Amino acid sequence: MAVSAPDVLSASLTSASSLVLLQFFSRIFTFVLNQALVRLASPQTFGTAAIQFELLLSTILFLSREGVRNALLRSSDAPASADLVYNISLLPAFGGMLFAALVALIYVRTSSASTRAQPFFLLSVVIYAVAASTELLAEPLYIRAQNELHFDLRVRAEGTAVFCKTLVTFIILAAFPAKYALTAFAVGQLAYGQATLYTFATAYRGDLHYGFKEVTVNLHGNTTNVLFDPELLRLSGAMTLQSVVKHFLTEGDKFLVSRLSPLADQGGYAIASNYGCPTPGSLVARILFQPIEETVRVFFSKTLPSITDLAPFTTPTDAQTAALQLSSHILHTLLLLFTHLLLLLATFAPPFLPIATNTFLPPRYRTTSAPTILGAYIYYIPTMAYNGVLEAFLAAACTPADLRAQSRMMAGATLAFVGAAVWFARGLRLGDAGLVWANIANLGARALYAWAFVRRYYAARGLAGAVDWRGAVPPGQVLVVFAGAAVVARVSARAGAPRPKTLWAQKRHIVTGGVLAVGCLAACFVFEKDQFAQVLSVLRKR
């Protein structure tokens, strides 16, 4: 590798801080936008825009580009391979346009009559498909920026796009009647795609083209012209096929909600899952942990592939051993961070969720499925964090055989998810919240599979003790403090149950929660200060 693991880590840490700021402003804009929409639009309209249209968009984008993105992160940084990588990066742009038209057509043909009857529904779907295609036109330059570790460009592009989307949507919502709400979101998304393309195109002025370029290579002693790197093309295809299953497993709850639930309940589900009224903990978690997942995917992809090429049970070089140890330390640190997130949410979110929903949810949404779904999301977010980082490691370090094995596991997980969703939702009468619990089970199983891969990976390279579950769990004293705080918080909630769920009426309960939270954080500092000092030491060196 031309770029060392510490250099990649340094760039990744810079990226993480920038992405956290991007996510912060993006989520704040989204929060404000959704708060306006839920007051201007009915739950039926909000469910269509925030569940069905967002699912349409994510299906087009994820299946068109995710596999290629992940595969090309593992490409060589040698100048000779740049044109081959660029040629592959054009495939999402061309294939995505056709795929967008196909997915939009299928969506319209399979939508319910009540969904299609909404004002400007068909026009909005067409605009969403065009918006997705426009965003995909920037994909070659996005991939180039990622491979060159130009994370600042990605942050600038997405930040500009979020601002344009928010501004355009607000203007249409404010200037036109409520019947244009779906169109407002569609045109806002088109502005997002155009801003993304414009930012990348101006940054790489003159370098954006949509023609394939032949490259002369020496293959088995013979000179030949090729368009694609065969290994990267195969890996891109394999990861794209796997992304079909991964997308259904990730968005399966929304697929089922969009087909099985009334539009009003879809609006309630959208409130819980799309930040219309998030709990403070969930908003902070998504602002922080999505950038972490994206950053470590780049770090592992740039650090581990050359080590992956080692035959199992062969001795790595000193530089490779140092990279392995650094990657294991980063992984342990993140998993420990996620465990703290789980402890905080499980301890404090359930006793205070009724106050949060009463404060943020508009009255007409309190009778939908939103409150119960938010209760399930308390456990969904940390599970998603565990799975995201562990699967990022697997994607960066896997061989084609590992990828095939994971695909078989995911195929089985798909069937299990559907069965679990039906059982939780109908057998246990959990309704739409049952779909979230089924997703939690699915993500947990995938995380365990990836964890087993991580342990095998290090053991095969002579570092069997490099990763261990004990490194991802706080000391026993911290667990005891959190358990005690959970009991006290629930007793306090029960004592305040007869009073209205307003901030003033529940002030004693809120103060109790604040004191308990400070106590838990103090316990973390006292009993884990050595771990914190070690992490800070690593960060200062980078």
Image (cartoon, rainbow, N blue to C red):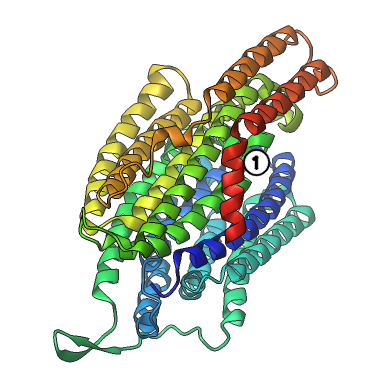
Q: Position of residue 339 (x, y in %)?
A: 52, 34
Along the line of sight, the residue nearer the viewer: 396 or 368: 396
Give the residue displayed 37% in from the left and 77% down from the top. 85
Along the line of sight, the residue nearer the viewer: 464 or 353: 464
Give the residue displayed 50% in from the left and 27% down from the top. 433
Is residue 491 rendered to the left or right of residue 346?
A: right
| Residue extending farthest right | 504
Q: Please, is residue 487 above or below residue 434 in the view?
A: above
Determine crowd level at label 1: few under 14, some 14-19, many 20+ residues with C-alpha closer than 10 A. Answer: some
Along the line of sight, the residue nearer the viewer: 359 or 39: 359
Along the line of sight, the residue nearer the viewer: 205 or 523: 523
Q: Position of residue 510 (x, y in %)?
A: 77, 22
Q: Position of residue 9 (x, y in %)?
A: 51, 61
Give the residue displayed 59% in from the left and 38% down from the top. 530
Question: Mark 1 = which residue?
Answer: 283
User: Which quarter of the image is occupied by the C terminus?
Assistant: bottom right
Q: Please, is residue 327 above or below residue 379 in the view?
A: below
Q: Secondary structure at mark 1?
A: helix
User: Which quarter of the image is occupied by the N terminus?
Assistant: bottom left
Give the residue displayed 48% in from the left and 24% down from the top. 431
Is residue 113 rendered to the left or right of residue 21?
A: left
Q: Position of residue 486 (x, y in %)?
A: 62, 17
* Kind of residue at disc 1: Leu
Q: Which picture quadrant has residue 228?
A: bottom left
Instruction: Decide if residue 49 is in sight here.
Output: no
| Residue extending farthest front | 318
Instruction: Decide if residue 315 is in sight here.
Output: yes
